[in-house]
Amino acid sequence: MTNNEHAGRQIIDGVIWKQLLIFFFPILLGTFFQQFYNTIDAIVVGRFVGKEALASVGGSAGQIINLVVGFFTGLTAGAGVIISQFYGARDAKGLNDSLHTAYAFSLVGSVLMTILGIWLSPVMLEMMNTPQELLAESTVYMRIYFGGIVFVFIYNIGASILRALGDSKRPLYYLIICCLLNIVLDLIMVLVFGLGVKGVAIATVIAQAVSAVLITRALMKSTDIYKLNLRKIRFHGQVLRSQLYIGLPGGFQSTMYSLSNILIQAAINAYGTDTTAAWAAYGKLDAIFWMVSSAFGVSITTFVGQNYGAGKYDRIKKSVRICLGMDFVVSVLLTLFLMFLRVPLFRIFTTDAEVIRIGSRMLELITPCYVIFIFIEVLSGALRGISDVIIPMLLTLFGVCLLRIAWILFIVPISPSIETLLFNYPLTWVLTSILFISYYLYKKRRLGPPKVIRD
């Protein structure tokens, strides 16, 4: 048995809390370095170009990119769940069919997104009320990013596959390498060549290309029961349908979050460049929590998926309780960290006093409610691991998307302030968490064998 195979088997045999942590920390650090791509872009242009460049990279353009990448990441979760279940059941044929189908889907999807992204970038930015002085540079940043989005898609699908197999370390190693490369290239592009927003976009694409090559090479060199062969990349019809059945609701769920955030971004843009820049900087600090939360979500999905494939239902229930407890403790600590250090943290991105003041107020309103969201992330991830995705998607549709839209359309106009606008976050988190807790308690009493189909 290889080291990677042994690590994967420990998920269904080892001490639960220990295996969750062993799996969680590489995912957390990997998510941190992945987020660092855009964060470094924002820091470099914010400090060395100006607040307009900061708003261009981290404002509307960042929200649109998050929408597209988030949707695809949700889709890859479908492949990850199917692969983790096949791996738990030691089904080599199903595993390899899923691997090659997932790669084929990422290649076809990236071509489509490249065409649409380059073509529609200015239209999407105008629809979001992007300030006129930010429109040109935001368009440049988006078009370059979409021009290289194939590398983002390939890395994400490859990382999702390795994590589903219990290997969360190698995706982390590759991201560390590429993040360091991105930092160096950002500084060279901005300080040496003076390319500004265009330069950080080019640097990001190059770094992402390196990560895509490394993750693909790792899958091709595998000595476990799975192995990527470039000549075998193609669609396997029923496997693709299984992956889409699980992945599409996850993609739509991510899209709902992003669409509601885009609506909020459009409303914030109306308050001017200072508020837009403050929200862009806050988004990078806010990402610290989402990195932790999503890492717990990915961990519990893989953990539940493999144990579900192995038929260990009691282990599934116990792992969910442990994961919720871990996420709660970490969320409280993160909230205290961000609250106490908010001003010096904002100074990392900008020296503008008004931007720092507005951003600090945003942080004060939202971060104390982080602990509420853990139920949505962990329970949604656990349900995804047993291939239950339709009801969680509907709960998210109602609790996050529809309620936020209603709040923006009907409540914010009555009291048009930043405080009123941002209150939608804790409100919708509370209501959606109640829905997820109720459904999970119902569902866990009815666990049954996995229903996975393939050729």
Image (cartoon, rainbow, N blue to C red):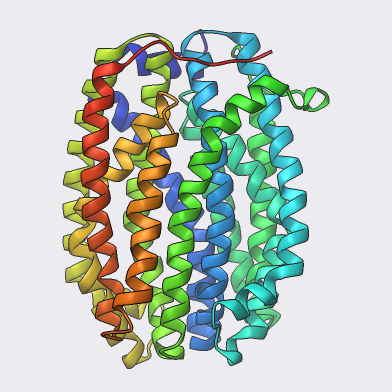
Residue 37 vs residue 373: left or right? right
The quarter of the displayed image where residue 114 is located: bottom right
Q: Is residue 339 in view?
A: yes
- 69, above or below 237, in the image: below
Residue 144 placed where, x, y %?
Answer: 72, 67
Q: Residue at x 39, y 36 (%)?
A: 391
Please tell me in which quadrant of the rendered image residue 410 appears.
Answer: bottom left
At x 23% / y 56%, what residue is drawn?
370
Q: Position of residue 308 (x, y in %)?
A: 39, 16
Depicted 12 relative to depicted 218: above or below = above
Q: Which quarter shows the C terminus?
A: top right
Is residue 127 or residue 225 the one in the foreground? 127
Q: Quadrant of residue 284?
A: bottom left
Q: Position of residue 120 (x, y in %)?
A: 71, 69
In the foreground, 350 or 294: 294
Identity of the residue furthest to the right in this view: 231
Does residue 430 appear to the left or right of 58 in the view shown?
left
On the picture, is 235 further left or further right than 244?
right
Where residue 250 sits: x, y (%)? 49, 41
The residue positioned 29% from the left and 64% from the top of the image is: 425
Decide if residue 50 is in sight here: no
Which residue is nearer to you in this view: 93 or 236?
236
On screen, residue 236 above or below 394:
above
Foreground of the two, 437 or 226: 437
